Image (spheres, rainbow, N blue to C red):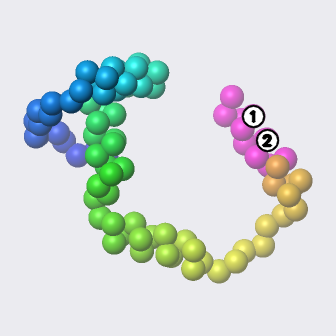
Amino acid sequence: MSMSKTERLQVLIETEQRHRLEREAKARGTSVATLVRHAIDLAFPLDVDVRAAAATAVLDAPSMEVGEVEELLRELDEVRGARR
């Protein structure tokens, strides 16, 4: 989410919760604040109805022809190789 951040929130948490957040932030190469914002977005999605409608649209989409499994795996290997 790329909205400008204008709100400040102070929350008291347990010491162990803070340690977990700090360890995870370090492991991900991000900030504790970013982790907290991400957790909020996961727990409380912006618009559940929009997300549900999108999921329904994907699931209701007509079937499409795809290649054989081996062909698909080769294509994936090619794409992954191009990213390295």
**48 vs 18: above or below:** below
**Which of the two residues, 15 or 44, is positioned nearer the viewer here?**
15
Cβ–Cβ under 8 Å for marks 2 and 1: yes
**26 and 80: which one is in front?**
26
Q: Quadrant of residue 38?
A: top left
Label 1 element class: helix
Q: Quadrant of residue 39?
A: top left
- Tell whether position 82 is magenta: yes
Q: Where's residue 3, x and y in %? A: 23, 46
What amino acid type should be assigned to the residue bearing mark 1? Gly
Label 1, on which residue? Answer: 81
Region of the chain picked out in magenta, as a range: 74-84
Q: Residue at x 36, y 50 (%)?
A: 42
Q: Residue at x 39, y 66 (%)?
A: 51
Task: Using the image, determine if residue 2 lies above or below residue 81.
Answer: below
Badge 2: few (under 14), some or many (20 or more) residues near its Cα, within 10 Å? few
Q: Nearer the viewer, residue 17 or 73?
A: 17
Where is residue 54? Give x, y as percent.
45, 70
Label 1 crowd bin: few (<14), some (14–19), many (20+), radius 10 Å: few
Quadrant assignment, res 17? top left
Q: Which residue is depicted at the point 11% across and 33% down?
A: 10
Label 2 to label 1, Cα distance in Å? 6 Å
Position of 14 with respect to 62 (left or right) is left
Task: Pinpoint residue 62: horizontal percent, then vertical percent.
Answer: 65, 80
